[in-house]
Image (cartoon, helix red, strand yellow):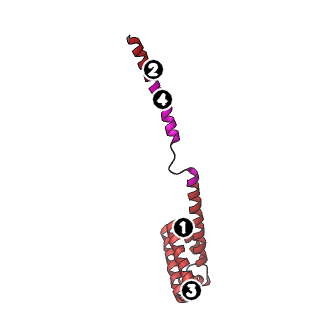
């Protein structure tokens, strides 16, 4: 009489163990990563493209004839500037690119004069040279 109860208990116990063994790995495998490798790769690619675009904006801004005049004022050359620009963090570079675009737009619209643009470029050059000095 007790024997069928024991066998039934063993079957239930075995079933529970098997369910646990097979259910746990499946549930772990079914978990979705917060960020997939494809999403991560896309984010890195976007960040790289943004940095490249910002480098181009700042480089264009600091290679204009007015910028060349400003470099003579602060006694620096374009190689130093390019080296310093490449060492800026992504955030610093983005801010500088944004300011450069604003200054160019303001100058094109006549909102600032040549002299004002020269002062803005000198300030940008001083910032870049400070960053260069801080990284050495």
Task: Looking at this view, name the residue that lies furthest to the top.
Answer: 1
Q: Which residues are magenta?
A: 13-39
Distance between mark 2 and mark 3 Cα atoms: 84 Å
Q: Give the residue pinned by disc 3.
A: 109
Q: Give the residue pinned by disc 1.
A: 87
Residue at image coords 58%, 78%: 61
Give yes or no for residue 4 being in the magenta stretch: no
Which element carries disc 1, helix, strand or loop? helix
Which element carries disc 2, helix, strand or loop? helix
Q: Which tag, 2 or 4, sits closer to the chain's start? A: 2
Distance between mark 2 and mark 4 Cα atoms: 12 Å
Q: Are marks 3 and 4 in contact (CB under 8 Å)?
A: no
Distance between mark 3 and mark 4 Cα atoms: 72 Å
Q: Position of residue 85 (x, y in %)?
A: 55, 71
Q: Position of residue 115 (x, y in %)?
A: 53, 89
Identify the disc placed on residue 11.
2
- Front of the two marks 1 and 2: 2
Which element carries disc 4, helix, strand or loop? helix
Q: Which tag, 3 or 1, sits closer to the chain's start? A: 1
Residue at image coords 53%, 74%: 98
- Front of the two marks 3 and 1: 3
Identify the disc placed on residue 19.
4
- Front of the two marks 4 and 1: 4
Residue at image coords 59%, 52%: 38
Q: Is residue 41 above or below residue 129?
A: above
Q: Position of residue 43 (x, y in %)?
A: 56, 58
Q: Magenta: predominant secondary structure element?
A: helix
Q: Is residue 63 above or below residue 92?
A: below
């Amino acid at each position: 009489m007790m024997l069928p109860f024991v066998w039934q208990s063993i079957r239930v116990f075995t079933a529970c163990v098997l369910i646990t063994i097979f259910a746990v790995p499946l549930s772990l495998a079914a978990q979705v990563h917060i960020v997939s490798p494809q999403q991560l790769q896309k984010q890195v690619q976007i960040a790289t493209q943004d940095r490249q675009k910002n480098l181009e904006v700042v480089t264009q801004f600091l290679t204009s004839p007015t910028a060349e005049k400003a470099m003579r004022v602060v006694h620096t050359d374009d190689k130093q500037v390019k080296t310093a620009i490449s060492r800026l963090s992504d955030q610093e570079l983005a801010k500088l690119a944004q300011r450069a675009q604003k200054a160019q737009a303001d100058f094109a619209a006549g909102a600032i004069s040549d002299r004002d643009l020269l002062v803005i470029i000198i300030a940008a050059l001083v910032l870049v040279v400070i960053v260069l000095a801080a990284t050495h």
